[in-house]
Amino acid sequence: MTRKNPATPASPAPKAAVKRAAVKKAAQPSAAVKTTAAKKQAAPRPKLAAAAGPAPASAPASAPAASASAAPAAPAADFGAGLGEMWSTLAGLQIPPQALSELQSNYLKQATELWNSSLPALGAGMGAMFGAAGGEAAPAAPAKPKSLGDRRFASEAWTANPASSFLAQLYLLNARTLQQMADKLEGEAKTRERIRFAVQQFVDAAAPSNYLALNPEAQKLALETQGESIAKGMQLLWADIQRGHLSQTDESAFEVGRNVATSEGAVVFENDFFQLIEYKPLTATVHERPFLLVPPCINKYYILDLQPENSLIRYAVEQGHRVFVLSWRNPDASCAAWTWDEVIENAPIKAIEVVQDISGAEQIDTLGFCVGGTILATALAVLAARGQQPASSLTLLTTLIDFSSNGVLDLFIDEAMVKMREMSLGDKSMGNPKGPALLKGQELATTFSFLRPNDLVWNYVVGNYLKGEAPPAFDLLYWNGDSTNMAGPMYCWYLRHTYLQNELKIPGRLTVCGEKLDLGLIEAPVYIYGSREDHIVPWDAAYRSTQVFKGPKRFVLGASGHIAGVINPPAKGKRSHWLGKTAALPATSEQWFEGAAEHPGSWWTDWAAWLAGHAGRQVAAPKGPGNRRYPVIEPAPGRYVKQKA
């Protein structure tokens, strides 16, 4: 076997990926908002994925090739058509006159009440300032103001300063009114959601707490430290500029293999796409069928192995499984041309083959997390089309299979956006005259951060730069900032055929690795998990997988979000999960939830019992990792996971 050590990728440029719609800033809603009595009819949206009918046939191999200059013409035309459609839907948006009038009336009423209630405090403050200067007695101070009900303004400095308190309350009033205006818009549903998202981004960015000149808490700290907090904040800002991203944790406190990703194991196989890690057993006997985990390729695998006490990998080893994990290579420029087919054939399918060879088992248990689950399911469908059923079981954690409705991420996906990505990141067949390029990891990380801007962006802007407080060490946020690149053609294929056209669930619609895909051909029983507060894979989207697979299925709903819901070890005794009272899996998630019961604690114990039922009898644990054909290459966690984007 030839061992390859991929070159270290270049540092990514610190560019935000989120495109914000322009929103006009105003102190109050303008009466000049144009409304019409007759609602404009938006142009009909083209059907991008027909529910039935064969996929368009590819051009014959003998067809004459177009000239290089004319090649991008069709993609460019499609891109222009997509933009035209977007503008037509924007033009069709309007606020009904009655709703607008009501919003304006309510705003003026609340603004007047705010001014009248704040005036005594403002007057007392001014009187105290000028009275003290003129030797006059200051007027009696008004009653202590109430809490503003927003954690950004929770400090006493906001309520103790009448001007700051008034400013914060005025901001909250304006924010509510802008959001109400966005809610009242009439027009195409997806465009309305985009406007709401853009308004929310603007509102969060415009908070007075984000600016030193308007933040009394940061100003007070600067005075108390004689400017040291500002100096420290500038140092942290400069360090982040050099680092290329906003720091969310003390990154110097962690090192992969030293205090994160520390479960003992060895790399037993590697190729250009991944390293395969086999973990050392912690029990005298193990189940006869090994267990392969496929993590998402847009993050690194050690979210499943942060610390011994919350490691899903270690938990599986402790349960008597012979555990293997696919550790993705962090793509560099030499990997920019990878396609979806190449990744499926050379990563999960190859990993399954190697695990079968090392263990001697014909069937193995498998798990996919997030997009790792989509990749794993695709690989198993390819193998099923080839007459192979290597999986004894399939676990899908917060995974999308049916992409018909995917929450906030849907806002970014339409024909124009996908075509733009194909023309900038895809290969020449996708209309990119320059050839394939990488999607930088920092761009993806920034996009996900701006899905929760107050928690993952502005909170750190205020703490790091305005207050000069270095963020504390937190292993989860260290992993979150350890971003990975993606090959452009692979990413573009994924966007178009899943999020945009939702073709993965349709039998025979897609051809991958030369095989027509039909997920219904996968015979393995499937354990499907969703997180109730997940904003990346909404739990109802995860539930829809139950309607795609044909074999035995079990669905479990956990509390919390995309990561915290999954990483919930039983020993912590945290959160809860929901199980169906019967084995029935009705057509909708709402119907299932009506018949489900809540159980305290982690869902891991339910899953462990289910997995054990498919893992086979107990056999003696292996004496060492790998075998003669696949000897140990290096200790876990290996080189690939340490590569930086």
Image: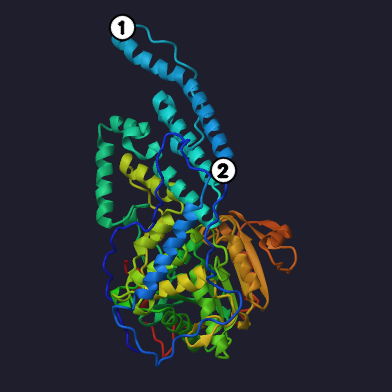
| First reached walking from the N terminus: tag 1 or tag 2 | 2
Cβ–Cβ under 8 Å for marks 1 and 2:
no
* Mark 2 lies on residue: 96
Front-lying residue, 11 or 253: 11
- Image location (x, y in percent) of residue 570: 58, 60
Tag 1: residue type? Gly
Mark 2 falls on what kind of element? loop
Mark 1 to mark 2: distance in Å? 56 Å
Residue reaching furthest to the top: 136
Local packing at callout 2 (Cα closer than 10 Å; few below 14, some 14-19, many 20+) is: some
> In what quadrant of the picture does the C terminus appear?
bottom left
- Image location (x, y in percent) of residue 433: 30, 75
Relative to 615, residue 201 above or below? above
Q: Which residue is at a point 41% across and 51% down the rendered structure image? A: 21
Front-lying residue, 388 or 352: 388
Task: State which quadrant residue 266 falls in.
Answer: bottom left
Relative to 617, residue 481 above or below? above
Instruction: Judge depth for marks 1 and 2 and give the one in front.
Output: 2
- Image location (x, y in percent) of residue 278: 45, 78
Front-lying residue, 122 or 76: 76
Q: Which residue is at a point 42% across and 24% down the rendered structure image? A: 162
Tag 2: residue type? Pro
Task: State which quadrant residue 138 falls in.
Answer: top left
Relative to 625, residue 445 above or below? above
* Mark 1 lies on residue: 135
- Image location (x, y in percent) of residue 62: 40, 93
Mark 1 falls on what kind of element? loop
Q: Which residue is at a point 68% across and 56% down the rendered structure image? A: 598
